[in-house]
Image (spheres, rainbow, N blue to C red):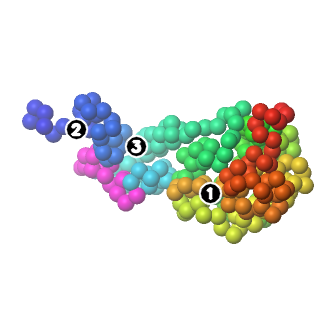
Amino acid sequence: MRGGHDEGPRERLERKGPSALADAELLAILLGSGGAGRSARALAEQILAGAGLQGLARQSARELRQVRGVGAAKSAALMAAVEVGRRLATRRLQAGDPVRGPEDVFRHFHPTLRDAPHEHFLVVLLDGRHRVLREVLTSQGTLTASLVHPREVFRPALREGAAALIVVHNHPSGDPSPSPEDREVTRRLARAGQLLGIPLLDHVVVAERGFRSLREEGAWDDLDPPSARDSPRGTAWSSVLKSPGSAGR
């Protein structure tokens, strides 16, 4: 209490800092005001009811505007705040950065793919030292062997002279466990990479609850050369290409 009045979220933020505030209090500050006879805090609690901040991150502007008291200005402010937070949380791989393992891939893609309502299939092009050339979105929708064709995956790699590539896709369900279709697509791409001389370094499945590396799970060990098959699990990346620093450009 201050001066006989309840302390509001703005006052609490100034006095204790943002980390001391509940999710609804932070959201109330963004909203600025309530509407329809309710306070900003009450409106914030309704928006967060059910799925909390994760649910908010998945909502579209149209869905937000269905909440009584949320108009175009408030929905835009909320979506902008979510995107700012997403970008701050993203540890983005830049062109020229080395990729040392599937953990790097997960850290790069998790903030942007964990809330995606549909599957996204991306290709990360690498040079001979496992450094990022760029990433390419090749398809969206349910992952199937017909949708993810080797031609579409390897076309940008051939065009840009990539030495290897990593493919990434998300599971909107939140469970990163690879499906039989995931494994079939992976083996098909691994065979194509061998024929083209552009090896598939990994297929990383990203989800809300973590990631799975099909390379580390041995999804196509039988297609690899003996040196890769004999490598301990988790070290197969270095056996597909020369170790970074010893390879050419």
Between 4 and 110, the residue placed more toward the observer is 110
Element type where label 2 sits in the image: loop
> At 64% from the left edge and 64% from the top edge, which residue is drawn?
178
For the view shown, which residue lies furthest in the bottom direction?
180
Does label 3 or label 2 sit earlier along the sequence? Answer: 2
Between 141 and 37, the residue placed more toward the observer is 141
Looking at the image, residue 90 sits to the left or right of residue 54; the answer is right
Q: Could you tell me residue 99's position as x and y percent?
A: 69, 40
Residue 98 sits above or below residue 156 on the image:
above
Amino acid type for the residue under numbered disc 1:
Arg
Asked whether residue 80 appears in the rendered view, the answer is no
Does label 1 or label 2 sit earlier along the sequence? Answer: 2
Residue 29 among those drawn in magenta: no
Q: Which residue is mark 1?
A: 212
Amino acid type for the residue under numbered disc 3:
Lys
Q: Which residues are magenta?
A: 37-51
Q: Which residue is mark 3?
A: 74
Q: Which residue is mark 2?
A: 8
Amino acid type for the residue under numbered disc 2:
Gly
> At 51% from the left edge and 36% from the top edge, which residue is drawn?
88
Element type where label 1 sits in the image: strand
Residue contact at pointers 1 and 2, CB within 8 angstroms = no
Is disc 1 surrounded by few (<14), some (14 to 19) or many (20+) residues within 10 Å?
Answer: some
Residue 46 among those drawn in magenta: yes
Is disc 2 surrounded by few (<14), some (14 to 19) or many (20+) residues within 10 Å?
Answer: some
Q: Could you tell me residue 49's position as x and y percent?
A: 35, 57
